[in-house]
Amino acid sequence: MKKRLVFFILLSLTNYCFSQKSSNNSITAGNYEEHLMHYFENKNDDIIHETINIYQNSNYRHMLDTLDQLLIFFFYGIKIDNTDRYNNFLEIINNSRVNRLINIFEIIENNNISEYLDKAETSPDLNDVYWALFFSSGNTNYLDRLFHIIMDNLNETENPIYYIAMRTALWSIASNMEIFPQKKEHTQRTNILSEDVKQYLFNNNYIQIDNDTREFVGIQRQKGRW
């Protein structure tokens, strides 16, 4: 099974230069990742200027295909959370003349992303979308969607995509609870997750959850099911 990490952590694994200092501005890709993940806590408007700097830095060109997809949902989350802030970001991007970023905002403007989310099929990629939306907005409804993915597919043994989506949702929640106390509190309070699932999350760290997942996938492969 290909190991999936929590949303922005994917970016830090793409290449060694992700952690290198930019040659033409002060933002590093490592710092940028950190700022994206904590944006929902501080709503710091510097994120839009940091985004422009990352896209203008040729050292990070290799990671932009991945970043494009993530930022569509990140900035859409901001649009839903605060239209005025989003419109200000849109103006800054248009004035920046960074075509890739202009294209990202055009996708947000010209597509019904809400409808897409309502119709999207369960998958590990959809989990990443929900994390992007949460990190940009702080709206716990997106965490609840992850909880529903877990409960809807808890006993999945036939469809490997659904199973991996369920397990990576568990993995990512466990990992995030170690970093963000508010996510741990929300997980404790939710009525969506069963008590058994809560106990599993609180009694196993993300490494153990990942190991359990790999073990089950291995068994399924040995049986010729996957």
Image: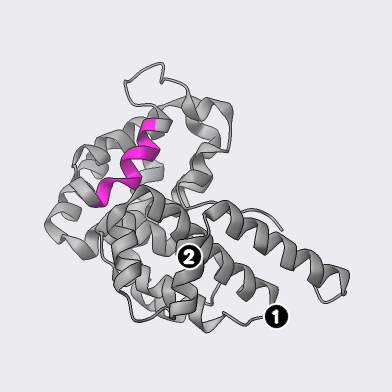
Q: Start and end of the magenta stretch?
A: 31-40
Main SS type for the magenta part? helix
Coordinates of residue 13 in the picture (x, y in percent): 57, 38
Residue drawn at x 40%, y 34% is 55
**Number of on-image labels:** 2
Q: Amino acid at mark 1?
A: Thr
Q: In which quadrant of the rendered view does residue 163 lie?
A: bottom right
Secondary structure at badge 2 equals helix
Circle 1 crowding by C-alpha within 10 Å: few under 14, some 14–19, many from 20: some
Q: Which mark is residue 201?
A: 2
Q: Nearer the viewer's eye, disc 2 or disc 1?
A: 2
In which quadrant will I find the N terminus? bottom right
Q: Is 79 inside the magenta-drawn segment?
A: no
Q: Amino acid at mark 2?
A: Leu
95 or 112: nearer the eye? 112
Q: Position of residue 20 (x, y in %)?
A: 47, 22
Q: Is residue 37 magenta?
A: yes
Q: Is residue 137 above or below residue 62?
A: below
The residue positioned 33% from the left and 30% from the top of the image is 53
The residue pinned by badge 1 equals: 157
Residue 97 visible in the shown view: yes
Q: Position of residue 188 (x, y in %)?
A: 33, 69
94 w.r.t. 16: above or below:
below
Q: Nearer the viewer, residue 46 or 225?
A: 225
Label 1's element? loop
